[in-house]
Amino acid sequence: MSPEIHSSRNLGPLSSPQKPPKGQEPAQRNPSAELPITTAAAAPAASASKKLTLVPLIFLIYFEVAGGPYGEEPAVQAGGPLLALLGFSIFPFIWSVPEALITAELSTAFPGNGGFVIWADRAFGPFFGSLMGTWKFLSGVINIAAFPVLCIDYLEKIFSVFESGCPRYLALLFSNLSLSFLNYTGLNVVGVAGIVLGVVSLMPFLLMSLIAIPKIRPHRWGSLGQKGVKKDWNLFFNTLFWNLNFWDNVSTVAGEVDKPQKNFPLALLVAVIFTCVSYLIPLFAVTGAVSVDQSEWESGFHAIAAEMIAGKWLKVWIEVGAVLSAIGLFEAQLSSSAYQVLGMADIGILPEFFAVRSKWFGTPWVGILLSSLISIGVSYMDFTDIVSSANFLYSLGMLLEFAAFIWLRRKLPSLKRPYRVPLGVPGLVVMCLIPSAFLVVIMVIATKVVYLVSGLMTLGGIGWFFLMKFCKSRKIFKFDISDVEVAQD
């Protein structure tokens, strides 16, 4: 996912204990049992739905994060081939690996839907859980809106009727609704579709890289860019950031994963390696085989390079792959947002009706509907500043996530952690400091408009928490409070 894409637009728990019947208190408390619990009304549908197995989970994570090397090109434009190659080789260890490790530990310790919302709630209480939910949900659904726009932007190159007016609006609406319906049919369907979309969209890059081998001149890899071209560090670091983040998004569907304690760490490991390789191989091939003006390395240049290396047929395939990648990104991130809503209802932050599941597919149709409606509305807007603000909120959420991770180690040292990052608290602090510093830098360079919109969104999230607290105290809506009672017992 490139910064350009983000600025113009921007994927029943296996081991959770069953809740006691209403009116009965648990006979015994155990910190390791503080797991989110699927609501009773949703349990039959949840258990009937097919669990997400290892391979579909890997591709779901892949589409939460990357979806292919689309959008990595501006790193070359900003810093030259050498810095781009170093960036995609080193940055995963600075950012992706720590985020993936945190996700692996906390998703296996709390294998329920809601992910990072549950972590913040368990660490600091419902206020911060709700605020985390607001920050991450707004960031997610606004980003979702970009993918149908991206699909239509590619299609308009073939069918000019979609450039503007009523045909474009109808195409956006139809693509949103059809992709949302696919999500409604089941998370396992989304995972299997991700496998197909991933293979088809990555195949042209593999072919391009193989065809490029005889044309590669290794000395080009050492270039720091053209003389007289100033380094654009803002673009460079944002390109790396947007192409290698969102590893924690998959945590919101932890309750739908088969054997999460085993599959989550393995899936994250494979996805990290797979994602890094999918970025580096085409980057090595194109920077070594093609010599063009540095300014031409904009988003989408891989398609132009494919035509230069192999012919127009490969360019078309990569452009089609971009559409397929956008579909995979939409499905993965819509799943994350929808199950986040369900998870927030499961722990009493939202009313119970937000956790309602489909009788046919066991999917959280209320969460899917809410996420889809917001994304449809945003897709018709010029939302550059809104998306930048949503990304600012995402950064705030990540800082809170790092803090929750470290605090949970101190607060619940005896909590059963099927996967545990092999570091003590001081080591974890060091591990989180570097990515936290990077987030702070990203936030400091934000514009005044971003600060204003982000502040208003945060105030809205705070107001929402107190509104839900009022509704709960006056019993205006029904909330699932049994899990909250267990956690605070």
Image (cartoon, helix red, strand yellow):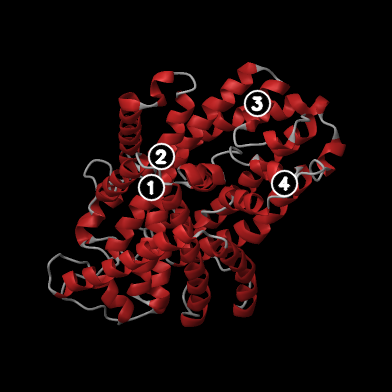
The disc, 1 or 4, on the residue closer to the chain's N-terminal end is: 4
Q: Residue at x 79, y 43 (%)?
A: 225
Most distant residue in the right direction: 219
Mark drawn on residue 84: 4
Residue position for label 1: 335
Q: Residue 481 lies in what quarter of the image?
A: bottom left
Tell me the amino acid under the disc marked 1: Ser
Which circle, 3 or 1, is nearer the viewer?
3
Look at discs 2 and 3 and give the one toward the viewer.
3
Quote the CA–CA distance across marks 2 and 1.
8 Å
Name which of mark 2 and mark 3 comes first in the sequence.
2
Give the x, y percent position of residue 240: 63, 50
Q: What is the distance, in whole Å, between disc 1 and disc 4 at their CAs?
A: 31 Å
Between tags 1 and 4, which lies in front?
Answer: 4
Determine which of the numbered discs, if any, sits on residue 304 in the image: 3
Residue that appears at 49% across and 27% down? 154
Q: Which mark is residue 190?
A: 2
